[in-house]
Amino acid sequence: MFSSSSSESLWVYVAAILVIWFTLVNLIKSERRKLSHIPSLTTDLPLLSYIGSFQFLFSPHTLLQRGYDKYKGKTFKVPEIFRWHVFVTSKVLVEELRKANDDELSFMDAMVEIHHVDYTFGQEVHSNPYHTPIIRTSLTRDLGVLYPEVRDELVTASNELIPVSDTWVKVQAYPTIMKIVCRTSNRIFIELPLCRNEEFVKLNIDYTIELVKTGYLIGAVPTFMRGLVSNLTSVTSMTKRSEEP
């Protein structure tokens, strides 16, 4: 059995190790050195930068407005838990970003990094993106043929979820729109009647939300813990459930 004093000492040592570890991570990360020339909206000192990351997490609108007012026409950065988020505020810089090649700035690589796709969707999703050319070619080419079905589902879902009334009716906009979009898009991929199945629609929506939440959660822990954290979330079980016949 540990005495109370020894337990307190143990926690002190653990806390000290964590502080040292996080400090070293901040000091050695090359990303910090690469972005040192970009002004930070909050302090970029080791450990203290985490204060700014929590401000960005809980009050992003206020922080970004302050950054825009202070650095309008320039570039500034805001700390996240394990990386920096860089913002540009001029038309010239935005145009430079738009014209950048994929080997310089890759939207897909950014999405993989932000949402930690390796731990949520799986590595094969971005290592073998077979679905991208299908959507760009076959699906896009056949949108005219699919339009009647898409319109039918859009109208049907809207009438069911937003009933016509002679008086004002309260509607929860966000969940209602998610259901309409889910049903309409699935009308293309799986057709009737499954696209209208309430359990299937709920699984689609819950899975999407859980993926985003898990991505943010994984981004808040060190790399060596991300696989463990991913397995502790409901993403794995929901993925298996979605693959059931």
Image (cartoon, grey):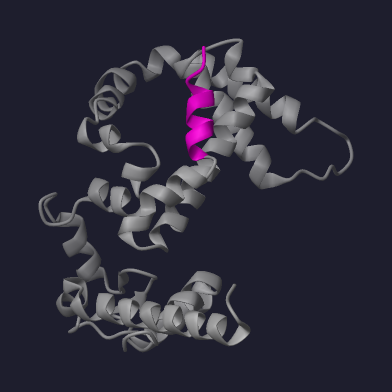
Q: Is residue 167 left or right of residue 43?
A: right
Q: Position of residue 116 (x, y in %)?
A: 35, 49
Which portion, as a residue range, is magenta? 235-245
Q: Main secondary structure of the magenta part?
A: helix
Q: Is residue 237 magenta?
A: yes
**Above/below status of 200 relative to 227:** above
The residue sitting at 49% across, 14% down in the picture is 190
The residue sitting at 68% across, 29% down in the picture is 158
**Above/below status of 181 relative to 3:** above
User: In this view of the protein, which residue sits in the foreground, 22 or 56?
Assistant: 22
Q: Position of residue 238 (x, y in %)?
A: 53, 32
**Above/below status of 90 relative to 151:** below
**Above/below status of 135 relative to 194:** below
Q: Is residue 151 left or right of residue 103?
A: right
The quadrant where residue 218 appears: bottom left
Task: Note whether residue 115 is visible.
Answer: no
Q: Position of residue 230 (x, y in %)?
A: 44, 46
Q: Is residue 171 magenta?
A: no
User: In this view of the protein, which residue sits in the foreground, 51 or 20?
Assistant: 20
Q: Position of residue 48 (x, y in %)?
A: 39, 87
Seen as rendered, the residue at the extreme front is 1
Task: Note whether residue 199 is visible.
Answer: yes
Q: Quadrant of the N terminus?
A: bottom right
The quadrant where residue 144 appears: top left
Looking at the rendered structure, the number of numbered marks drawn on it comes to 0
The residue sitting at 62% across, 39% down in the picture is 177
User: In this view of the protein, which residue sits in the foreground, 57 or 92?
Assistant: 57
User: In this view of the protein, which residue sits in the foreground, 167 or 7?
Assistant: 7
